[in-house]
Image: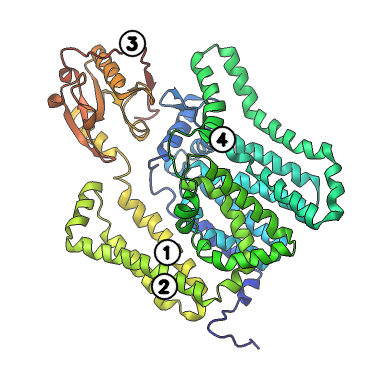
Amino acid sequence: MCSKKSVSQPSTAWLAHPCLPWFFFLFAAVLILAGTGLRSPWPADEPRFALIAKEMVESGQWLFPLRGGEYYPDKPPVFMWSIAVFYALTGSLKLAFLLPSALCSLLTLFLVYDLGSRLWNRQTGLLAAASLLFSFQFVLQAKSAQIDAMVTCWITLGCYGMLRFMLTERRWRWYFTAFFFMGVGVITKGVGFLPVFMLIPYALYVFRFKQSRRNSFRDIGKWLAGPAIMLVTIGLWLVPMLLVVDNSHDPLLQQYRDNILFRQTVTRYADSWHHIKPFWYYVLNVIPAFWLPLSVALPWLIPGWVKALRAGDGRILIPLGWVLLVLIFFSISPGKRGVYILPALPMLALIASPYVTEIVKRNGFSRLITVIISALSLVLLTAGVAGLAGVDKLLTLQEKFEVTPWWWFIFTGSCGLATLLFVREKNTPLRWPVFISLLWVSWSTWGYVLLENVKTPVNVYDNIRAHHGDNIEVGLVDFAEQFILFSPYPVTHFGFHTPTEKQLAKAYVWLEDNPSRFVLTSKNNLKGLCFDSEKAEPAGYAHRNEWVLLFSDSKLEQCTISAEGIPEYHYRPATR
């Protein structure tokens, strides 16, 4: 017979069901892949990576990423390669651009599950994976075509290899595997080496609690082989790149090499030029919201961790020490974005998992989760009703962003309140998973459809085509990558980092050569520089700007800004 449980002591017997892992990963795949193919790449980063991947397939240039014909040195090419492979296989950019992040996130989930199962038991492994899946930032990035979900996967593979080596099997192959994936991580995004920080808490663990293992540090050759493997892995991309650059004698390729090796790594970390935030930014501004619900559980997790540390439990000490080191590492850099600390989240979910079944029984935790769901649901529901009622401030937002989300707000808010109503006190731990899953599914379907036209410049190009037909060329000035990605026309631009006034001067010259050429730019750029704003043709509203077309008749009698030395870059879509 089943034992009787109180409402505050939810049963966890169902976690032992042998088929549960299969159901869990099937559910995770549905949740993460929901909406794939329903939307286009959206700003800020997705159009850039999708354009580069598309251009790789069209041009055959895979070693040096091109962005509208201009070399793109900000990131190594691995992530763009992955999108390009899926684009070549499927022929659909809408499918291809989201698949790498989604598949990498599913692999990350499995790694956390497997680690939890090996370090504790299968039930704990499932709780670790579930804690990660229902964390807000994890699924947010799994559904985004940014590099961070992929580099998190490689970093988690590095941590997986390290922990298998340090805590379970003591086989050097896992240590070497960890460094191999660190190398893959580095050529995906420079921070892929982060798992090496695990050696610091591991050394503390060995010398403080495991005196019998001190002799293991005498295997100097094997310890050094790990970093060597990482360097060899990096060399799989780096060496061919350097050889081609050296033999090309091309100053643009030399500039690419210097930028990606130095400016985008050491300089970007130590002397960032954007996203400047204070030291405490991650702790106060990112973790509380983006790491829900684990952030809410911290007051109950910390005492358990302290107890484990005092007992010398390496399963907690090593990953926890690593998470703290990663947070410190990113906090030291003046340039900060919330997504940078995503790689620490899987290990946080891992070390939270042994305590989950006890924490969800705590009334304080359950009340906090209920308050959060209630607050979010009421805000959405109220905003939706107010929007339908025509409240002025909300109508202003509707006009500004050209989207009417009120019914979606009402639906999502109602789902949250229904979750609180129907998932009763006995099953309180399920409230957050149910709520956040409904939120993600509604966002990935209804939300995608709502925002698709707002997040792309398709309407601008539709207006141009309606007035000027198909046989024109477009020059772009002060624009983002989506204006190349969605262009049905051959595109010319004058460098992403060229000052706007210099771009206008070059566009002034470029228009002289062909009457079928038009320049597309934001209306805000026309301040008496080279062109007459009164003779600009409105092209439509997109990305919070009014866009205008300029042609030969729009030119002033002269342009006083020199266009000397300003480059031209060209991109022609493969299909018209």
Describe the element under mark 2 as helix, strand or loop: helix
* Residue at image location 64% in from the left, 67% down from the top: 304
Q: How many marks?
A: 4
What number is the disc on residue 564? 3
Q: Viewed as shown, does residue 100 lie left or right of 419? A: right
Residue wearing tag 2: 419
* Residue at image location 32% in from the left, 68% down from the top: 378
Indicate which label's residue lies in the foreground, 1 or 3.
Answer: 3
Q: Residues within 10 Å of mark 1 (few under 14, many from 20)?
A: some
Q: Residues within 10 Å of mark 2 (few under 14, many from 20)?
A: many
Kind of residue at badge 2: Thr
In the displayed structure, would residue 116 be above or below residue 330?
Answer: below
Q: Residue 565 location, x and y as percent?
A: 37, 12
**Alpha carbon separation for disc pair 4 and 3:** 35 Å
Indicate which label's residue lies in the foreground, 2 or 3.
Answer: 3
Residue wearing tag 4: 78
| Earlier sequence position, callout 1 versus callout 2 | 2
Q: Residue 206 location, x and y as percent?
A: 79, 53
| Earlier sequence position, callout 4 versus callout 3 | 4
**Alpha carbon separation for disc pair 1 and 3:** 56 Å
Kind of residue at badge 4: Val
* Residue at image location 39% in from the left, 40% down from the top: 44
